Image (cartoon, rainbow, N blue to C red):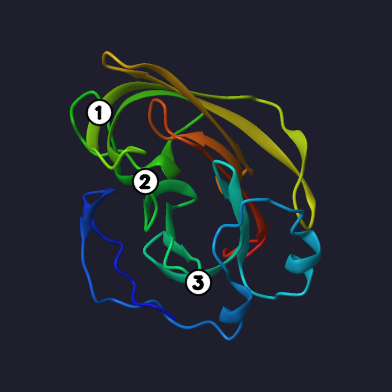
Amino acid sequence: MGRFRAAHFFGLAVCIGVVLLSGCSLSRSPLWATLGSFVPIHKDVSDDAKKISYASIDLSLGRRGGLLILAEQKDGLTFWQTGRDEVVVLNHGYLQATSGLTPRLEMSQAFDAQGRPVSMKSVAGQAEFVVRRSWVDDKGVRRAGQAQARWSCQSQTQSVKLPLTTRDLYKCVETLDWEHKGDTRSVYWRDTDGHVWKADVAAWPGGPEVRWQVARPWWPLS
């Protein structure tokens, strides 16, 4: 496995920011050989997920995707890395950063009206907050933006089919009004404990859609 040259994270109160480090490798999984790069044609991964006992997600970025096994986790952060050092980092199940990809998300933070960090894990059914993100576009240009976020969750669950199960989940919609860049809309499906089982995310204006759904969770099931 190659060296992990992606993002490491530090706490800003209850919010996590991003700083870039190099030379830190992720732990080897006994099933590391099952991981490849994001393939151009995304197939149904259910059969593959059944054969693997490790935590895994079915993830696609734009037109590429595949089954990824959890490589590392710490303080709510989970690291998902392909055999080509393409890395996706989730923060309590919400997209935090990507690395080894172009375009890519470099940082995501949320703040309340007083400028205090907000943990997405604690966001209730209806909320407003500010999102700040930085990214590299498809031409390799580094950009940054700020958006006013509106968060709304349905009060009733709906049945959602996942790679290995079907669960009753709450649909939550995050609408971001970007300064001078229009709106983006992301959808998350959460259980009663707030765990994200599925997400369709537009991380920044004009960026590729990032989708994932949990095959085997990395948290204990109640």
How far apart are the alpha carbons under marks 1 and 3? 31 Å
Residue linked to disc 3? 83
In the rendered image of this protein, does residue 26 appear above or below residue 14? below
Count of all numbered marks drawn on residues in the image: 3
The residue lying toward the viewer, choosing from 218 and 63, is 63
Who's the residue at 39% across and 25% down the image? 205
| Figure check: 29 above or below 147 | below
The secondary structure type at the circle numbered 3 is loop
Three-letter code, disc 2: Arg
Label 2 residue SS: strand
Q: Earlier in the sequence, mark 1 or mark 3?
A: 3
The residue carrying pointer 3 sits among few (fewer than 14), some (14 to 19) or many (20 or more) residues within 10 Å by Cα, namely some
Which residue is under mark 2? 104
Asked if the residue under mark 3 is in contact with the one under mark 1, i.e. CB atoms within 8 Å, the reply is: no
Camera-nearest residue between 143 and 55: 143
Residue 113 falls in image quadrant: top left
Which residue does the image show at 69% across and 39% down from the upper left?
A: 169
Return the disc, 2 or 3, that comes first in the chain's sequence.
Answer: 3
Please name the amino acid that badge 3 sits on: Gly
Residue 215 in view (yes/no): yes
x and y, in percent, of residue 220 in the image: 61, 65
